[in-house]
Amino acid sequence: ALSEDYQALSPETLGARLGGVEALASRIGPDASAWSVREVGDGNLNLVFIVEGPKGAAIVKQALPYVRLVGESWPLPLTRAFFEYHALTRQAARDPGRVPEIFHYDEAQALIVMEYLSPHIILRQQMMAGRRVAGLGRTLGEFCARTAFRGSDLSMQAPDKKADVALFSGNVELCDITENLVFTDPYFDAEMNRHTAPQLDGVVAELRRDEQLKIAAQHFKRAFTSRAETMCHGDLHTGSIMVTDDQARIIDPEFAFYGPMGFDAGMLIGNYLMACLAMPAHVADDAACTAYQDWLLDVVGETWATFAGEFSRLWHTERTGILYARTLYEDQGDHLASEAALREVLGEIFRDAMGFAGIEMHRRILGLAHIAEFDSIEDPDVRAPLEEKALRLGRTLVLSRAGFAGIDQVIATTRIAA
Ligand code: ADP
Ligand code: MG
Ligand code: MG
Ligand code: MG
């Protein structure tokens, strides 16, 4: 059995320490000495173990009291496991079947025992290998729309919503990471930044001198800190999605917070667009590369179209909260006003999403946490021009967000940039 005091697990100690956890033993097999344990965490923050035995397998994810990538010099609270656990339960309710099933949660040990997704791999790896995922845009668009709508005042009862906002407002340190690393550091010479130098020095200086861009970045930081519209996943990049050739599941919501409805969709679209622009370095054959880029742009379009379609469906069928009450519209026979209100809300979410997408593209090239699509390109003279395309497209998304007629124009703009 577990002691009350937190202790980090290791492959050697996991069986002895978790052997008495019924939810685990019933899935793996009763004899913990017959379990095989591998640490597989490839993320920046936490320990992740695959535990296998005669009856099956499970994942054990445990927070560390510091940032794994950096070490003990950067402390980070264990409570992130608490927020991940609570986020997973809400996501499971709001979009059933999309996140791993939880088998056990131990707050003192900051650990979650959950479903082992297999043979799934991380979407970013799938994309770098030039492999498609059938239905990807539909699944992610639905996930973003359902979690956005069902976690908001459009759907929830006000006391429940306010209690949940209060709960997640405790996720201070993980929000602080986003507030600094995403919205601020890329736009000045912050200590932990890095970029491909000297090749990008010119464009980096240009962006940091760009008044309108820095105003917009702070506009979106203000939205992030103050617009508690819905529970966001908070870290929905392509490393937080696990896939097969025809399935997608969402993991790792420890950054969950109540924020703008377009945040998750925007971060995700920013990651799709970077994958698209980086692809020439990963697929040697020109025609194959173009075909794959076309598929990625189809995913962008499908993700947004599905988001808008599903959000609209929920608007028509599940608008049970205090916002845009039916008493103001349908109940008076005024369906057109309800449609106009929906269009306004979706338009605002779209513009926000494009802003968050562009900022995500900047921080992944200029900030601390880069992405493998660019980082794995060894030759800086090959890498820099692709990164520069992404920086410039990111700026266009942020500053021209209100000028796009829709996602098709964003896709056309990306095609020209690529
Ligand atoms: P971190 O918060 O440290 O980024 P993640 O939750 O992203 O941790 O997990 C790190 C890695 O562990 C993932 O990239 C994935 O390879 C693996 N992993 C995590 N959760 C699961 C799961 N439920 N099933 C299978 N593999 C998983
Ligand atoms: Mg992760
Ligand atoms: Mg990972
Ligand atoms: Mg994480």
Image (cartoon, grey):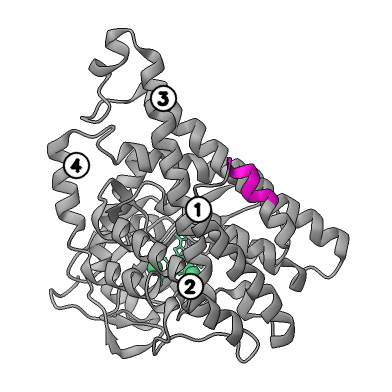
The mark found on residue 161 in the picture is 4
Q: Residues within 10 Å of mark 2 (few under 14, many from 20)?
A: few
Residue 245 on image: x %, y %:
66, 51
The amino acid type of the residue labelled 4 equals: Lys
**Is mark 3 in CB contact (under 8 Å) with mark 1?**
no
Q: Which residues are magenta?
A: 405-412
**Is mark 3 in CB contact (under 8 Å) with mark 4?**
no
The amino acid type of the residue labelled 3 equals: Ala
**Is mark 4 in CB contact (under 8 Å) with mark 2?**
no
The response on whether ligand 2 sits within 8 Å of label 1 is no
> Is 375 one of the magenta-colored residues?
no
Q: Residues within 10 Å of mark 3 (few under 14, many from 20)?
A: few
Magenta stretch prevailing secondary structure: helix
- Tell me the distance, in whole angstroms, between the alpha carbons under discs 3 and 1: 21 Å
Where does label 2 land, which residue? 210
The mark found on residue 340 in the picture is 3
In what element is the residue under mark 1? helix
Where does label 1 land, which residue? 354
Disc nearer the start of the sequence (3/4): 4
Q: Is residue 244 above or below residue 134?
A: below
Q: Residue at x 76, y 56 (%)?
A: 292
**For the N terminus, which image quadrant?**
bottom left
Disc nearer the start of the sequence (4/1): 4
Disc nearer the start of the sequence (3/1): 3
Q: Nearer the viewer, residue 261 or 73?
A: 261
Q: Nearer the viewer, residue 229 or 320?
A: 229
Q: Is residue 265 visible?
A: no
Q: Residue at x 30, y 52 (%)?
A: 259
